[in-house]
Amino acid sequence: MDFRHLKKLLLAALFTSAILSSSAMASYLSDGSSGVFHPLVDATLDLSDPAVFPQFSNVYIDAGIRVTVLTPGTGYGYLLSADGIYLNGIFDTGAGSVSLNAINSIVMGSGSQLIGGSLALSAINLILRGEIKATDSATVNSGGNLIDLNGGRISMSSPVPLPAASILFGSGLLGLLSLVAGRRRR
């Protein structure tokens, strides 16, 4: 039996599969001025280096896709788009801080979610039909043109009262009640 043909066939099959097989995740490399961020499956986007500002021509996150974002320990992680950011899925920074900046538009479709500790959105046109969940703060800047919140929600978690504040309030209330009770006795 001649194994040379089998060896050539195996090499051809490996070469073909290497060329035709594509990664399940989109390429997130950018030269600073071009490229499209469009993951096809759940993905992680690393914005943890505060000195690097990834810029794409467009950012697309489809419905059913969750992008988990790694942010710096302090300060904001920045994502820049030369044209627009189109969010129909979930963009989740956890408790981190992220700034989304698009020259033209940031569009959040219904059912989309933008989740983070501190969030900043800046674009000429903002169409927000999804939900923005910020545990610390949210800043929305439209550049003066359009903010469309038709059906969208912005939710901020309320701060938890400090135990010391409730103790001070309680002791002050008791002092006030004792003054009122002291006047009644006279």
Image: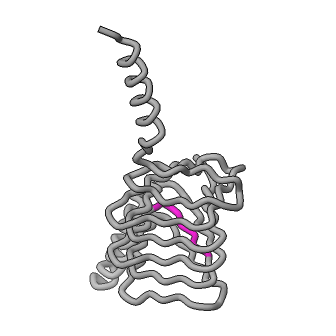
Q: Along the horizontal axis of the image, is 73 left or right of 163?
A: right
Image position, residue 114 (x, y; %): 43, 67
- Residue 117 lies within the magenta run: yes
Magenta stretch: dominant SS? strand
| Residue occupying image coordinates x 62% and y 79% | 104
The spot of residue 35 in percent (x, y) is: 61, 59
Q: Residue at x 42, y 29 (%)?
A: 14
Question: Residue shown at 43%/72% (left/top)?
Answer: 132
Picture coordinates of residue 181, whole percent (x, y): 29, 79
- Using the image as rendered, state which of residue 101 and residue 117 is in the foreground: 101
Q: Residue furthest front?
A: 1
Q: Is residue 158 visible?
A: no
Q: Is residue 55 magenta?
A: no
Residue 40's quadrant in the figure?
bottom left
The residue segment tinted magenta is: 116-122
Q: Does residue 30 show up?
A: yes
Q: Could you say which is closer to the camera, residue 37 or residue 126?
A: 37
